Image: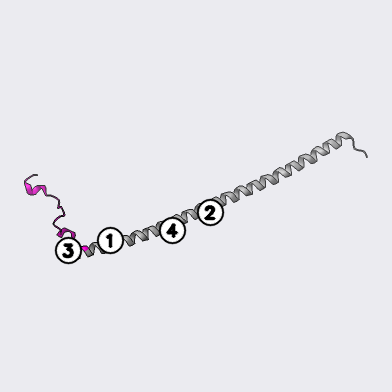
Amino acid sequence: MGFDINALISLGGLILAFTTTVCGAILWYVNTEKKKYAAERDFNHLRRNIQQLSDNISFQTGELEKQFEKLERDILEIRMHLGMKSLSDAHWVSRPRDDRSRGHD
């Protein structure tokens, strides 16, 4: 049972084709997994960034509330010092004009 050269060449070509197909499939799978990992990593990175932004906004909102409370206390202290009950008691506050009082309709 002898093999002729054409059969050996055909068998070698078949083995080479099978080997390259398997290697290609393995490389395709590895690249797919890398892309999946990279996409997951990017998504987690974005999620952490959004969480940090949310935390920073909450912190800044708290700081602004503290500043507004301080301003309210300061304004109240100034009003008490000036003896004003409300801002409308101040003579320097301009009041809106009523056009009907001047005879214009």
Distance CA(mark 3)–CA(mark 4): 41 Å
Q: Which residue is mark 2?
A: 44
User: Which residue lies most toward the top here?
Assistant: 6
Give the label on residue 54, or none: none
Distance CA(mark 2)–CA(mark 1): 40 Å
Q: Which corner quadrant of the image does residue 72 belong to?
A: bottom left
Q: Which residue is mark 1?
A: 71
**Residue type for callout 2:** Asn
Q: Is residue 48 magenta?
A: no
**Residue type for callout 1:** Leu
User: Horizontally, is 54 left or right of 84 in the view?
Assistant: right
As helix, strand or loop, the secondary structure at mark 4 comes to helix
Distance CA(mark 4)–CA(mark 2): 16 Å
Residue depicted at x 32% and y 60%? 67
First along the sequence among labels 1 and 4? 4
Q: Which residue is mark 4?
A: 55
| Front position in the image: 63 or 31 | 63
Residue depicted at x 53% and y 54%? 44
First along the sequence among labels 2 and 1? 2
Residue depicted at x 72% and y 44%? 23
Look at the image and tell me in which quarter the C terminus lies: top left
Q: Which residue is mark 3?
A: 82
Q: Are marks 2 and 3 in contact (CB under 8 Å)?
A: no
- The magenta region covers 78-105
Mark 2 neighbour density, 10 Å: few (under 14) some (14–19) many (20 or more): few
**Residue type for callout 4:** Asp
As helix, strand or loop, the secondary structure at mark 3 comes to helix
